[in-house]
Amino acid sequence: MAARADAQSPTMPSFSLAERAGTVLVVDDSATMRTVVRRILRQLEVENVLDAPDATSAFKIMNERAFGIVICDVQMEPHSGFHLLRAVRDTLEIAETPFIMMTASLDAKNVDIARHRGADAYILKPFSADALRRKMEEVLPMGCHVDAPEIIAIEPQTVDRRVRTFTGSR
């Protein structure tokens, strides 16, 4: 009971979803879907959004700057969202980034794979602004997110090596 009173205390700061999210990365191979998700985020007053057209681009960007949350499609080519999620969870500097997987597939196996690989939430396309808000509120820390450092201090050669490993090229 005391915890509930503390949560409603006037001295407890209240942060907006945008403040909690920091910079959002949207990853989808469909330009239309990236635009739709950006619009939904704008409805939620989340304006600080970058996007990536594929998992490789997203992984490179994530090794160069901090993100408060990633919203990623499952089915992309040549690397799936699951491949990106596994690489993120295996990379110390970005492993704790909240990750929401999105898909149009009703296959329950995908939900299990997402959980097993470390997804924080899973959302079925198409989704409403309210559904995305609920998922984001579930996975984002209660405090204000700070993209600190805004740029991740990783040597460019290390980023290149990680991307080569991610794509399977030498």
Image (cartoon, rainbow, N blue to C red):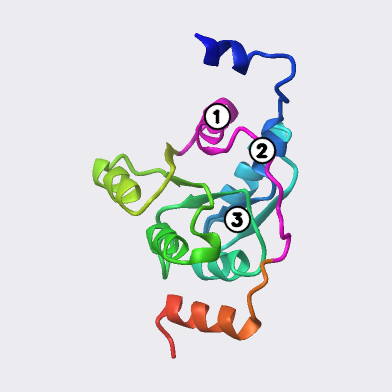
Q: Position of residue 48 (x, y in %)?
A: 74, 47
Please give the name of the residue rendered at 71% of the width and 25% of the height, measured from the top-left corner.
14
Q: CA distance from mark 3 to mark 1?
A: 18 Å
Residue at the spot 43% in from the left edge and 40% down from the top edge: 121
Q: Is residue 5 left or right of residue 47?
A: left
Res 89 visible: yes
Q: Earlier in the sequence, mark 3 or mark 1?
A: 3
Crowd rating for badge 2 (residues with CA inside 10 Å; few <14, some 14–19, many 20+): many
The image quadrant where one finds the C terminus is bottom left
Question: Could you tell me the amino acid type at mark 1?
Answer: Ser
Q: Provide the residue designation for mark 1.
A: 128
Q: Picture quarter containing residue 143? A: top right
Residue under label 3: 31
Residue at image coords 50%, 52%: 72
Between discs 2 and 1, the one toward the N terminus: 2
Left or right of 27 in this view: 104: left
Where is residue 136 shown, x and y percent of the image? 55, 35
- Please give the label number shown on residue 61: none
Magenta residues span: 125-151
Determine the CA span between mark 2 and mark 3.
Answer: 26 Å
Q: Which mark is residue 20?
A: 2
Q: Is residue 126 magenta?
A: yes
Closer mark to the observer between disc 3 and disc 1: 1
Q: Where is residue 119 shown, x and y percent of the image?
A: 41, 48
Q: Residue at x 53, y 28 (%)?
A: 134
Q: Secondary structure at mark 1?
A: loop
Observer-nearest of 75 and 67: 67
- Disc 2 to disc 1, C-alpha distance: 20 Å
Amino acid at the residue labelled 2: Arg
Which dot, 2 or 3, sits closer to the camera? Answer: 2
Amino acid at pointer 3: Ala
